[in-house]
Image (cartoon, helix red, strand yellow):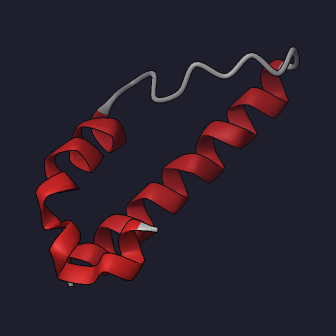
Amino acid sequence: MFTAMGSHARPILDRLDRFIASRRRAGLNIGDDDAEMRADEMLLAATIAARERIAG
């Protein structure tokens, strides 16, 4: 969604940076530690990719 906005989404870059730098990114409660770790890693990768697309 934000990536479709391109440079217009730049005001959220600071929030994406905080999310990326955070040790605990998302409070997932899947019930399986390995699944939670994989989900967190996928979310991190997606956030980094989105940040790169927004920043240009």
Q: Nearer the viewer, residue 6 or 52?
A: 6
Q: Nearer the viewer, residue 14 or 48?
A: 14
* Relative side of 2 to 26, left or right: left
Quadrant for the C terminus in the image: bottom left
Residue 10 screen position, x and y as percent: 15, 66
Residue 6 screen position, x and y as percent: 27, 81
Q: Quadrant of residue 38?
A: top right
x 58%, y 19%: residue: 27
x 46%, y 68%: residue: 1
Q: Quadrant of residue 7?
A: bottom left
Q: Quadrant of residue 8?
A: bottom left
Q: Nearer the viewer, residue 8 or 37?
A: 8
Question: Taking 6 as reference, is 27 above or below it?
Answer: above
x 23%, y 47%: residue: 17
Question: Taking 25 as reference, is 13 above or below it?
Answer: below
Residue 20 screen position, x and y as percent: 34, 43
Residue 32 screen position, x and y as percent: 87, 19
Q: How many marks?
A: 0
Which residue ends up furthest to the right in the rendered image? 32
